[in-house]
Amino acid sequence: MNTQQPIPAPPPKTLARLAGRAIADFRMIREGDRILLGLSGGKDSLSLLMLLLHFRRRAPIRFELGAITVDPQSPDFDPSPMIPYLAALGVPYHYERERIIELADAHMDNDSFCSFCARMKRGVMYSTARREGYNVIALAQHLDDLAESFLMSAFHGGQLRTMKAHYRIDAGDLRVIRPLVYARERQTRAFAETARLPVIPENCPACFAMPTQREHMKQLLARQEAEQPRLFRNLLSTLRPLMSAGLPDDA
């Protein structure tokens, strides 16, 4: 990874427009917000980092931006190269090590490893945000993620649910935003490749040892989109009320 004085990559106009529209539609960012971005080092979170830096320079409102990476201490996934990269960008960075792999053996119960890991990471992000004075957590899930979650919930849970675009957590002190909910995965992938963002492959053996439910849904959606090019446009209309659920009244 090249860590010598990286320059924030300007995002493509289409991607910036979609993220900006989502931020406006769901009233995600307000004056004086202190935003903590969940940064895995993958293409999506790095793309969102560049978008938020872009908006911070150009938006009419002022907000602060920091980032956090939760290192699960897996021998197959090392996000530590993010430390010098964020330092060179001048973004306040919180690199938190958590023994998630080790803790999973003792505390996972009947939960899947992926669910356990996500819950543990979320807890670390919440506690770090409180300790450091952030009031908003930004996550990088995109429209493909929301569509997959919707199908998984309908097929396996018997519920019509997906990830929310903007909500306040149960404790009431933090808001969570997802500025990429209108964007497609192929757009963040293309941006990361074109801009040569320092993507760190996520190689978790527990997640990739066998095809997951999410991967099955991804393949199903890809087959359907090949036959129906307007599929995701239609899905966005379907998902919009579910994405809006929990939108803070004061947002």
Image: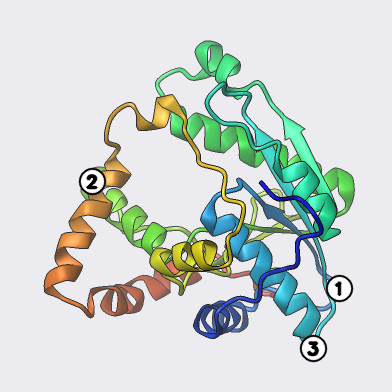
Residue picked out by circle 2:
216
Q: Position of residue 63 (x, y in %)?
A: 83, 72
Q: Earlier in the sequence, mark 3 or mark 1?
A: 1
Kind of element beneath mark 1: loop
Q: Say which of marks 2 and 1 sits in front.
A: 2
Is residue 112 visible in the rendered image? The answer is no
Q: Residue at x 53, y 56 (%)?
A: 43
> So how many labels did they put on this image?
3
Expressed as whole percent of the image width and height from the top left, the position of residue 33 reads 81, 69
Q: Position of residue 41 (x, y in %)?
A: 61, 47
Residue named by callout 1:
32
Residue furthest to the left: 227
Residue that numbered label 3 is attached to: 60
Query: Tag 1 or tag 2, which sits nearer the N-term?
Result: 1
Residue ID at (47%, 30%): 204
Label 1 is placed on what type of residue?
A: Gly
**Vertical arrangement, residue 182 with respect to residue 93, above or below:** below
Left or right of residue 106, residue 50 in this image? right
Q: Secondary structure at mark 3?
A: loop
Residue 181, position in %: x, y? 48, 69
Q: Nearer the viewer, residue 151 or 11?
A: 11
> Within 10 angstroms of label 1, few (less than 14), some, or many (20 or more) residues?
few
Q: Residue furthest bottom?
A: 60
Q: 10 Å neighbourhood of mark 3: few (<14), some, or many (≥20)?
A: few
Element under disc 2: helix
